[in-house]
Image: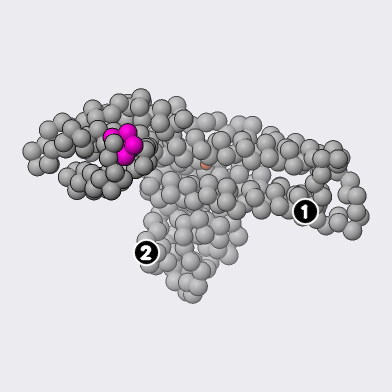
């Protein structure tokens, strides 16, 4: 196994190797117009981890074997960021785009049984993908984020949460077969539409397959390695009393427990019989006292300091 591209190579040369690298650039927030700059230069200028970019690019070109080389080198945070951006791209652009093409191609109507079935199968496929990515966004990524902060959640192990990707493409394959075998266009002049839609269905299947493989071959093993390296019980937030940290009042603790359970400012105000402005002031004070400014960080603090139980968080997150 050899690594094809390094950070000293020109970005343009890497892209020339495989068009799919343009998609990686897009998902990593790397702009075009980089001229003769190297991978290292382009990544540095855009605050992108060059090793992660190279891992994705070389993996795309070289296949699964390359993933093994990068497991202990890749930035898990950057890789997770990339996967999240991919999920957004699927939900907001790719899946609706293919649906529009299909609708246009089959002249969707309930009276045309095959057309109806095609859209139905497609929508079921989209639902399955959305369900899968939702689990990753709401269960897996927050757990990995805790791990990156040095906190080992005894209830979180990536291997327990990772949903098998097997069978994910089944609906799409069925859809492809229905279109190929049974769909005849009522208007022969519209043949190109259905062929275009079919091509995009096949491309969509390949994109999803590559995404799942990347999670299985690189993301999950890299997180497993992180789990092994992070000693159980290590916590990034001080437990119980910390003399350097201002104590939260009982009221603030109560309010914090609602914040981390996902209640809105309005809901908290109603619960505590106070105004929304007072809620906002409390929240600012809590963040200032703890020097923690993200809900994820506050959540970990609240769990570690027994302000809220893990079960409460789980129930609110995974409802
Ligand atoms: Fe995913
Ligand atoms: Fe996945």
Instruction: Classify residue 172 as left or right of residue 262.
Output: right
| Residue 315 percent coordinates (x, y) | 41, 27
Query: Which quadrant of the structure image shows residue 252?
Result: top left
Residue receiving disc 2: 44
| Residue 243 percent coordinates (x, y) | 8, 38
Mark 2 lies on a secondary structure that is: helix
Q: Residue at x 23, y 27 (%)?
A: 306
Q: Residue at x 43, y 49 (%)?
A: 81
Disc 1, disc 2: CB below 8 Å? no
Query: Which quadrant of the structure image shows residue 126?
Result: top right
Q: Is residue 156 above or below residue 17?
A: above
**Which mark identifies residue 80?**
none
Q: Report whether residue 291 is seen.
A: no
Mark 1 lies on a secondary structure that is: helix
Q: Report whether residue 31 is seen.
A: yes
Q: Which residues are magenta?
A: 268-272
| Residue 140 percent coordinates (x, y) | 43, 36
Most distant residue in the left direction: 243
Mark 1 to mark 2 CA distance (whole Å): 43 Å
Residue receiving disc 1: 104
Q: Residue at x 59, y 56 (%)?
A: 20
């Amino acid at each position: 196994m050899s690594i094809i591209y390094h950070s000293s190579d020109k970005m343009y040369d890497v892209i020339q190797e495989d068009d799919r690298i343009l998609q990686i650039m897009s998902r990593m927030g790397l702009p075009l117009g980089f001229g003769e700059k190297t991978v290292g230069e382009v990544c540095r200028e855009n605050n992108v981890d060059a090793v992660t970019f190279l891992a994705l690019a070389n993996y795309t070109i070289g296949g699964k074997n390359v993933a093994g080389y990068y497991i202990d080198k890749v930035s898990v945070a950057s890789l997770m960021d990339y996967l999240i951006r991919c999920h957004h791209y699927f939900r907001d652009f790719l899946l609706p785009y293919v649906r529009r093409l299909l609708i246009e191609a089959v002249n969707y109507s309930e009276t045309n049984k095959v057309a109806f079935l095609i859209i139905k199968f497609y929508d079921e496929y989209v639902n399955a993908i959305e369900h899968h990515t939702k689990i990753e966004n709401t269960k897996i990524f927050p757990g990995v984020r805790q791990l990156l902060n040095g906190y080992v959640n005894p209830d979180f192990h990536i291997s327990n949460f990772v949903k098998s990707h097997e069978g994910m493409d089944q609906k799409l394959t069925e859809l492809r077969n229905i279109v190929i075998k049974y769909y005849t266009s009522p208007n022969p002049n519209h043949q190109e539409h259905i062929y275009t839609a079919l091509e995009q269905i096949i491309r969509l299947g390949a994109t999803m397959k590559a995404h799942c493989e990347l999670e299985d071959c690189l993301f999950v093993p890299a997180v497993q390695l992180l789990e092994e390296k992070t000693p159980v019980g290590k916590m990034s937030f001080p437990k119980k009393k910390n003399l350097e940290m201002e104590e939260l009042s009982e009221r603030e603790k109560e309010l914090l427990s609602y914040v981390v359970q996902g209640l809105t400012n309005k809901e908290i105000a109603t619960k505590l019989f106070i105004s929304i402005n007072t809620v906002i002031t409390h929240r600012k004070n809590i963040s200032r006292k703890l020097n923690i400014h993200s809900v994820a960080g506050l959540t970990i603090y609240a769990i570690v300091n027994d302000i809220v139980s893990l079960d409460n968080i789980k129930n609110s997150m995974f409802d």
